[in-house]
Amino acid sequence: MFDVEIIGNKINPYCKDSDVWYPLGQLTCMIAAGETDWIKKPFTVITNWKLVEEKARDYLESCFHSNDVTDKTKGYLFCRSKYTYAKESYTVTKHFDEIIDEGKVKLQVKDCYHFDNWVELMDFEMMYATANNISIFVCKNCGKYFATLNSGAVYCDRIYRDNKTCKYFGAKKSAAEQVKNNEIISFYEKSYQAIYYKKRIAKNKSETKKIDKILKTMQKNRLEYRKGNLSDEKFLSMIESYLTDSNN
Ligand SMILES: [Zn+2]
């Protein structure tokens, strides 16, 4: 069981046990980056963290490949239709704090959500992050996802090297390069969704199989591109050829 609490645009991964708050979406970003130190409670049910990481990346890329609210919403709905596991099986408990507000004692009621499925927790977080139009970007220095309340942010706060953050190193990189990368990923996601739609309306098994194969190859190439193993030009021409292949 894993507990989270949400207030406004922030999420706390421990509920009443702690007062650590992240921008909504950051838990999924950390899982995607393989950073799981914040998980205090042992999770015996997880045997394959790599698979959970991959799902987290998939969610983030589908929902947050662009900072446009329509794209985010479409991306989230796309994920909902793609992952067909039991939804909303989490439970909620309430707790309250006594707070002093302008000299008066008041009750602050909080909802604590309990999850026993990681994908469900990520789906829940992505749902709120989308609904609240949170900005989630790929850090242009380390390449990892981060959630931020600053829609103009480009670099994350992770320590990159020599005890200095990505923000510190990133300031030196060119702005034009960052815009170009964002546009390419956005083009990839739109193409992926268009091809995925073709799978849903496929007329027979062999057509479905063919499109499945294209989608899998696309995911592999996206990963290679993110790792920097594919150039912009090569990646773009690959996407274009997949669009053509899926039409034949
Ligand atoms: Zn970074």
Image: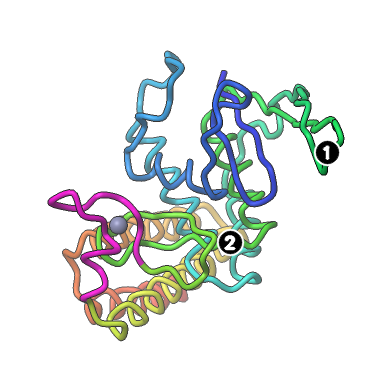
- Under mark 2, the amino acid is Gly
Residue at image location 57% in from the left, 43% down from the top: 83
Which region shows up in magenta?
155-172
Q: Residue furthest left?
A: 162
Judging by the rendered image, the residue that carries numbered circle 1 is 103
Find numbered disc 1 in the image and state the secondary structure of the residue it sits on: loop
Q: Residues within 10 Å of mark 2 (few under 14, many from 20)?
A: many
Does the beta carbon at disc 1 come under 8 Å from ligand 1?
Answer: no
Residue at mark 2: 75
Q: How far apart are the two marked residues, 1 and 2, measured between alpha carbons?
A: 45 Å
Left/right of residue 56 with respect to residue 109 in the rendered view: left
The amino acid type of the residue labelled 1 equals Gly
Residue closer to the observer: 118 or 134: 134
Tell me residue 220's x, y (percent): 29, 56
Q: Residue at x 37, y 72 (%)?
A: 242
Ligand 1 resides in the quarter of the picture at bottom left
Question: Quick one: label 1, few (<14), some, or many (20+) residues within 10 Å?
Answer: few
